[in-house]
Image (cartoon, helix red, strand yellow):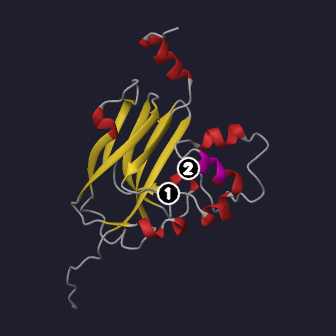
Amino acid sequence: MQLSVSALLGLVAAANAHGIVTSPATRTPGDATAAVCGRIMTKFYQADNTSYPEALFRANPNGIGKDYNPNKCNLYLCRGYQFADNAKNVQSYKPGDVVEMDVFIRIPHKGYANVSVVDTTTNSIIGTPLIDWPDNYAATLTPPANQTKFSVTIPTTLGDKCTTAGTCVLQWYWLGQGQTYESCVDFTTPKSTAMKFKA
């Protein structure tokens, strides 16, 4: 039996969405993540790196283990993935650099999305989103090209906020119907070279 396009779209709408940034390199879970987020969480994402935290909790209604430490593992900041597992993937950008990004949408699902510079010490956006889609992100069976291949520009207003590795990430964030997706690209910018004069 062949399904019509509308029927296929209906099936997609009923399914869970899935997506991840494939370029530049993003955080992945390893031993440091397992130490604070637990083995259940780590194995869950290693089995499907396009999934999301709400599905993790739904798949484990009795909890995700005693080795999950919510004070050290924020599942809504880079999915909880720890910098220590990803120190070799830190990108070096200068203010004004244009960063090309590729996103893999395995299952489209209408929602809101953006890419922002996020301070990982406070889980807060620095400035405003570098690019955003207020609605209709991944709303069709084949998302528009500018939703899966696009570029962002490193702000010139970061100062010295992102000079230490692990402090700043480019975070792709997609929220649709209660499903949260995040991919984080660790990066640093050079320290300010402005000369300081004594009075």
Mark 2 to mark 1 CA distance (whole Å)? 9 Å
Residue at the spot of label 2: 76
Label 2, secondary structure: give it.
loop
What is the x, y in percent for residue 65?
A: 76, 53
- Residue 111 shows which numbered tag? none
Q: Quadrant of residue 170?
A: bottom left
Residue depicted at 26% across the width and 48% down the height: 151
Q: Residues within 10 Å of mark 1 (few under 14, many from 20)?
A: some
What is the x, y in percent for residue 117?
A: 37, 56
Q: Nearer the viewer, mark 2 or mark 1?
A: 2
Q: Which residues are magenta?
A: 43-47
Mark 2 and mark 1 residues within 8 Å of each other at the beta carbon: yes
How many tags in the picture? 2
Residue depicted at 56% across the width and 41% down the height: 51
Residue at the spot of label 1: 123
Q: Residues within 10 Å of mark 2 (few under 14, many from 20)?
A: some
Question: Quick check: can you spot residue 159?
Answer: yes
Question: Quick check: can you spot residue 71?
Answer: no
Label 1, secondary structure: give it.
loop
Residue depicted at 47% across the width and 69% down the height: 87
What residue type is disc 1 on? Asn
Q: Is residue 147 magenta?
A: no
Mark toward the start of the polypeptide (2 vs 1): 2
| Of the pair 25 and 193, the residue shown nearer to us | 25
